[in-house]
Amino acid sequence: MITPYYRSASHDFALLHGDTFELLPQFNFHFDMIFADPPYFLSNDGISVQAGKIVSVNKGEWDRGGTPEQINDFNKRWIGLCRDKLKDNGTIWISGTYHNIFSVANSLTELGFKILNVVTWAKTNPPPNISCRYFTYSTEFIIWARREKKVAHTFNYELMKTINDGKQMTDVWRLPAIAPWEKLDGKKHPTQKPLSLLTRIILASTVRNAWVLDPFAGSSTTGIAANIVGRRYLGIEQELEFVDMGKQRRERIGEFDTYQNYRSRIRDIAKAEPFEHHLMCEPACDDLPF
């Protein structure tokens, strides 16, 4: 029997500590949406710039690259496990750069997913290119795919149009990287995504009370975004430091002032709030089997 490392008092946020390859097969529950930020395999002893300082690009042993064959096998294994955890009308979002995104796309196709979009996240504040030998890296890609080719998925088209000032939203999103207020006492996960990005993803493809899974939870940005827009969340993370970080972040938004502060800082939420009240809701009675 699985025991969550942490569960919020309202049962809308749970964390499992361990290896996603070992934990996912141990329970039977189907999610409305999955967001995954898997290893990009970027830790190659290079350097980059953060907050004006030169830093190593190494994230940890979990981000060390292997052979192309090993990377393909890794992606196909975890995506296959996630497919079994999606509802028939569920969708998955997977982030990456050129280092891993082609392997991810191939794995999705081989496993029977239908790729819906490849969103380009154009960072409005990218780190500078200190080598000055090529263009500055300023984008990441997020593949959006549905589980079944012939089963309709949730897409809140009118809501996205409202957020985009009445115009159809394109697959290029201009959003900043994480802001100082998103860090936990000045600390962050080395690959932490901004709440503005995760909030838009969740608003686009789920309804209220929907369940969201993140198999590589990091510091649980997906869960924080899910909870501040009325969705429920399960995260799996193998590094205890980051599980604890996710727990602390969730407990902070349990404070009403912090919760309201987060919502007020994310532009999409203010634009979406009047529209969201008209959206259907998933029943809130279903709960995780542990």
Image (cartoon, grey):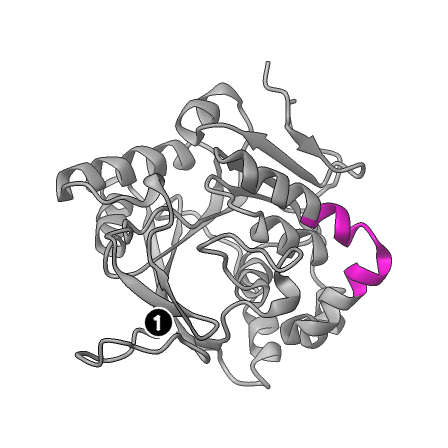
Q: Residue 239: in sight, yes or no?
A: yes
Q: Nearer the viewer, residue 124 or 115?
A: 124
Residue 239 to residue 175: above or below: above
Q: Which corner quadrant of the image does residue 163 belong to?
A: bottom right
251 part of magenta stretch: yes
- Most common secondary structure along the magenta stretch: helix
Residue that sits furthest to the top in the current view: 1
Q: Residue 171: in sight, yes or no?
A: no
Write down the residue under mark 1.
139
Residue at horizontal 56 percent and vertical 47 percent from the top: 219
Could you say whether the residue bearing mark 1 is in a helix, strand or loop?
strand
Q: Which corner quadrant of the image does residue 187 belong to?
A: bottom right
Q: How many marks on residues?
A: 1
Residue at horizontal 57 percent and vertical 64 percent from the top: 156
Where, quadrant-wise, is the N terminus in this rendering? top right
Q: Nearer the viewer, residue 79 or 174?
A: 174
Residue at horizontal 27 percent and vertical 55 percent from the top: 101
Where, quadrant-wise, is the C terminus in this rendering? top right
Question: In the shown orientation, is residue 5 left or right of residue 78?
Answer: right
154 part of magenta stretch: no
Q: Which corner quadrant of the image does residue 133 belong to?
A: bottom left
Residue 175 to residue 60: above or below: below
Local packing at callout 1 (Cα closer than 10 Å; few below 14, some 14-19, many 20+) is some
Q: Nearer the viewer, residue 5 or 284?
A: 5
Question: In the shown orientation, is residue 92 left or right of residue 276?
Answer: left
Residue 185 to residue 216: above or below: below
Q: Position of residue 140 (x, y in %)?
A: 35, 66
At label 1, the amino acid type is: Thr
Provide the residue span drawn in magenta: 249-260
Q: Position of residue 26 (x, y in %)?
A: 49, 19
Q: Position of residue 130 (x, y in %)?
A: 28, 76
Residue at horizontal 71 percent and vertical 57 percent from the top: 228
